[in-house]
Image: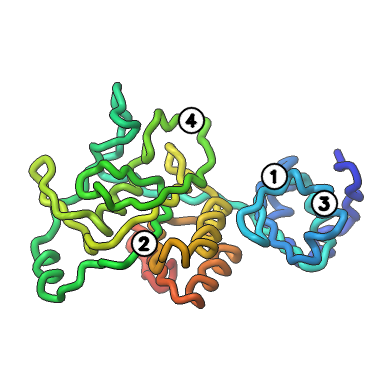
Amino acid sequence: MSVAAGVPPDPAGMPGTYRQVDSAVFAALDAGHRVDVIVTADSVARSTRTFGVLDTKLKATGESTFAASLTRSEVAALGRLDGVKINLDLPLSLDPPGNKAAPRQTPSSAMDTFVTVSDTDGRLAATQTSLGIDGTGVTVAVIDSGVDPLAAGLAGQVVHREDLSTASSSCTDNGFLDPYGHGTHVASIIAGKAETHSGYNIRGVAPGAKIIDLRVFNCAGSASMSNIDAALNWVLANKDTRNISVVNMSLGGPVASPTMRQAMQAGVNAGQLFVVAAGNSNLSACTVS
């Protein structure tokens, strides 16, 4: 067993010793030499020598959260520290859009303009008109696969972009801001301006709103919980300067994430609204959102 310099070896009976380490982490370590984890550490833990030794292996996703690929001995070393919690960094997924944004042979302005959305129900426009509400003054952070600002209905709607995704080994972005297509579809539903495109009448729910594109899913439609943590913590750090009042998360995963829940609760406490997908499996939203 390899042991990082300055990191003491793990003792016998590790699962019983480290109460703040998720048992699933040890199960994963039994199946492999390394495991992808999310580490939560308070300021005292972060100031310790042990934490400093492993600093280069810990990628910050927030003030107190980190993503890392660690060995058993490294998990053991961190697990001994007070103020540290360790959970698996599990994959998240997107259902592919009806018309996936496929890279063209000659990209134009390094963006994909051929992502389509469904023909808007005319009752939506009538409701917006009768209520006199169209989202003006609201900024929505879309945590997704990226947003193509040149797609139908989205010209001038995307006011900022951050790429927090992890590159895929199975595909390349090929210069596109949303090579998977899902985020553009979602953003069009949220804030697409009235526009006729290829015979479709496109209009979003809140065409007066603006979009902040927080890309976390790569070209294969894959991300991990730590990518989402990074996006949520970016929202918390920039909510005032960017006037973010709504966060949209049309994504899914296998289990609940304590770090994701913590970041979202902080946002709720700050007055933000989170819109989270209930999935496409015909399950109760009360049990999966």
Marks 3 and 2, how far apart in space?
37 Å
**Quarter of the figure with the N terminus:** top right
Which residue: 46% across, 63% down?
241
**Quarter of the figure with the C terminus:** bottom left
Q: Which residue is mark 1?
A: 69
Q: Which mark is residue 52?
A: 3
Say whether residue 73 is visible.
Answer: no
Q: Amino acid at mark 4?
A: Ser
Helix, strand or loop at disc 1? strand
**Badge nearest the viewer, 3 or 1:** 3
Q: Which residue is mark 4?
A: 170
CB contact under 8 Å: marks 3 and 1: no
Which residue: 23% across, 62% down?
208
Q: Amino acid at mark 3?
A: Gly
Q: Which mark is residue 140?
A: 2
Position in image of residue 151 (x %, y %): 25, 43
